[in-house]
Every structure is written in C-alpha cells, then in structure tokens.
Image (spheres, helix red, strand yellow):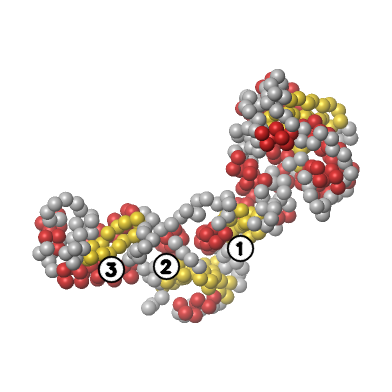
Amino acid sequence: MYAIVDIETTGGYAANNAITEIAIVLHDGKRETERFESLVNPGMPIPRYVQALTGIRDETVKDAPGFTEIASKVSEMLQGRIFVAHNVNFDYSFLRHQLHSIGIGWTAKKLCTVRLGRKIFPGLPSYSLGNLCRSLGIEVNHRHRAGGDADATVRLFEKLLESDTKSHLQEMLKGRSREQYLPSHLPAEELERLPNQPGVYYFHDKQGKVIYVGKARNLLKRVTSHFSNNKINRQKQEFLRNIYSITYQACGTELMAFLFECIEIKRLWPKYNRSLKRFEPTFGLYVFEDQNGYLRLALEKKKRQLKPVYTFSLIIEGHNLLRKLIREYQLCPKLCFMQKGEGSCEDFNNGKCLGACQLEESQETYNRRVLESIASLSQELPSFTLIDSGRSREEQSCILVEKGRFYGMGYLPADTAIRDEKELKNYLTAYPENDYMRGLIFQHASKWPNKRYTFSS
C-alpha cells in the first residue's frame, strides 16, 4: 500500500542532477513487506559538498548500475502505491523526472512525513528528519544515506500512524487536499485563510523576510497556482524550499493590486522578484536651445541628470506625440530631429514649416510656438480619480491622478461625495510612481470611462 522512499542526489533539483542512491521500503501500514536498495551511477561528477555530506564519492558509484538499469524494478515497486517520503516533493520530483526521461509514465498519491509530523505532533522545535526523530525517540543510523534515512522514515511513519487519532493521513490523501503539493515548511492553514478577492501576497522565508511579492485577482487561487505546478528546475525547487509563511494585503480591485505590487517590490526588493525590479521610465521628450538660439524638441532615452517635459514607455508613443505637436504648432521636423539630411525640411517646401530650418523664421516667433506646444502637454496630463469597488460593501476604492501623475490610492466610505482633490487626499496614501504604473491607470481609465471622475479645475 505504501512505498516509503529516500534518495541521495548530486544536487537539489531534478532538471540538471541525478540520483546517486535509492532505498524503497514497501509497507502495508503495519510492517515492512519488501525492500530495495541500491547505489546509482549518476553519469556525472558528484560535487564535493555532496560527497562530504553523504560520503558517496565518484569512486563509490563507479561500478554501480545507472538508473536505466534499475528503472523497471523501481517502477514495479512504486506503481499503484502511495508514495511516502520526508519532504516528499523532492524525492517525488526526482523519481518522476528520471522515469519519464526514459519513457516510463508514473504518478502517485503522496504523503509527506514533514507535513504529517506538523499535524500529528504540533509545536515541536524542528521537523527535519534528524530533529523530528530525536524529539520522538527514534534512533537514526547512517544519516544522509538512502538506506539509513529510509529506515528512520519507516519508523517515523509507523509512529505517525499510531498517533493519528484525528485521521490527518486520510485527509491528506483526499483528492482535493492541498497537503499533497504544498512546500514542506508551509502550514496548510496559511493557504486556507487567504480570501477570494484581489490583493497582494508575500512569501516569507524561515527568518520572516519577504522573498517574493505577487498580485492577484483572487488571492487564494493565485497563491495556490504557485504550488500546483512543481517544476523540476533549480529556481522553482529552491523557491519552494524557502517558503515558510504567507501574508497578504487585500485590495479593492485588481488594478490596485497591480499598483501595490509595483510599490512593494520597489520597497522590499524581494529575492525572487525579477520582472518589475528593473523597470524604469524608458523615453523622455526634452527641450534645449541650439547654437542658433532655436528651441529644439528631442526624443531620447531617459536621462537621470535631465528632466523631461514628458515621458513614454515606448518610443512609438513619443513619435506619435511629437508628430502631433509638429502638425498643430507648425514646428520644424528637422529641429525636432524627425527628419535628417542637408537643406530644408520637407514641410518647408509645402508651407507647413515657416523656415526655422533655413533661419528664415526668427528665433522669437518659433520659440514661442515651441513653448506653447510644451504648455499644451498639460492637457495630456489631466487630473482625475478612478472610483471602484472597495474591500467591503461599506467602502469604495479611489485612485488619484494629479496632473498626469499617479498621486496615491486608498478607500472612502461608500457614501462619501467627491468635492475636491484636497479633501480627497485625506483618505489616500501617497505612493511613488513610474511610467509602468501610470500606463496601467490610463489604460484602465480608457477601458472603463464610467469609473473616471475628472476635476473641473
């Protein structure tokens, strides 16, 4: 009924590592019925730190069978049995990967003695195999060898079965039990208390430090999805091993969760977040005076030492806006770096450019139109709020954009009337912003105009 397993490997994740030793003990719930144990030639060098930990060296496995030679026996013992191991997802991921790599399909129900130990013997100082066995008076011989650790796991499993007065084992074996796939250090209760609403969630390591921040339309479903796909690569396996607890911040809407995720990643700089850490505004529209005294508009990558008059996430957005200013204010395309080459610009020949590129229009009149075009950008930077659902029926959420920039967000009583920005800010928290966040807000405002409220002044 049960296959109690322990393996030793060349490293901590299945994708680029291999098994060096395996022990499988079949158990009927009362006693051991069959046993298989073997060294395994991994077909790759064993790292020194692994050699030091296990005592298994390259010479030790030189004449041992490769996994393909024992695969049929391993598959025979595992098929149709409940897979039991200490930190079960580690052993399971290796064996499933190794079997699938040679064309043997296998899946099984799993039981983790770490998770069972937490349920049946709560409050112990540690649930590592050595410490848990020590707390329960179980002797462990040949630590960090497959046979010795498998024997310890068998005795631990028997003690768990004897003490399971509340049927935790049967609960874990139910088809919808989250215990099957959760990281070994994460209590199931941490997941069960997550709400089905938008928000931001935090994964914490053993010391309580935030190692990942994520956003969610539905907190429970999104967090659960992290654990339902147990990938075999190093990053995913290391990530899962370091998750010890979850906290969350509920938000009124998915948009607020998106924005708050950006804010928290910048504030906390978590180890496993990558995508939003490096986001910075990409392009800016700059104005400067050339040697002839003409004001020139230029699209450039964002420069720390210069302040742009407008910013863009994509260069095409900048080109579209600059062409619009050229057309509406009769600016010279060459002085705006939208045309190259010698001589006059193309618009000069059709009368749209008044000759600044040929020094035929005075600096004073041309610069006046440049300044007017820059002033017109304030119309592209409106002030408005987005009013939407709150975290409960008693409140509504509010996001404030002030002169084109994200000011902050918060929650108002559901019956609060909006009068002016100053009064509104009493309910809001101001946050730092960037082009990405601003883009999210403007996209949402364009998609849902009925949620947008524009101030009159």
Which class describes the residues within 10 Å of circle 3: few (<14), some (14-19), or many (20+)? some
Position above or below: 108 against 400: above
Which disc, if any, is residue 250?
1
Q: Secondary structure at mark 1?
A: strand
Marks 2 and 1 in Cβ contact (< 8 Å)? no
Work out how far the residue at label 2 is from the one at label 1, CA to CA, in angstroms: 24 Å
Q: Amino acid at mark 1?
A: Ala
- Which amino acid type is marked by label 2? Arg
Q: Which residue is mark 3?
A: 374
Judge from the rendering whether residue 141 lies leftward or rightward of residue 317; answer left or right: right
Q: Amino acid at mark 3?
A: Ile
Q: Secondary structure at mark 3?
A: helix
The one nearer the camera, 94 or 149, is: 149
Identify the image quadrant of residue 315. Answer: bottom left
Placement of the C terminus among the 4 image quadrants: bottom left
Q: Which residue is at 64% across, 54% downward?
A: 203
Residue 311: x and y in percent read 36, 61
Proximity of marks 3 and 2: CB atoms separated by less than 8 Å? no
Secondary element under disc 2, as helix, strand or loop, is strand
Direction from residue 401 to residue 194 in the image, left or right: right
* Comes first in the chain, label 3 or label 2: 3
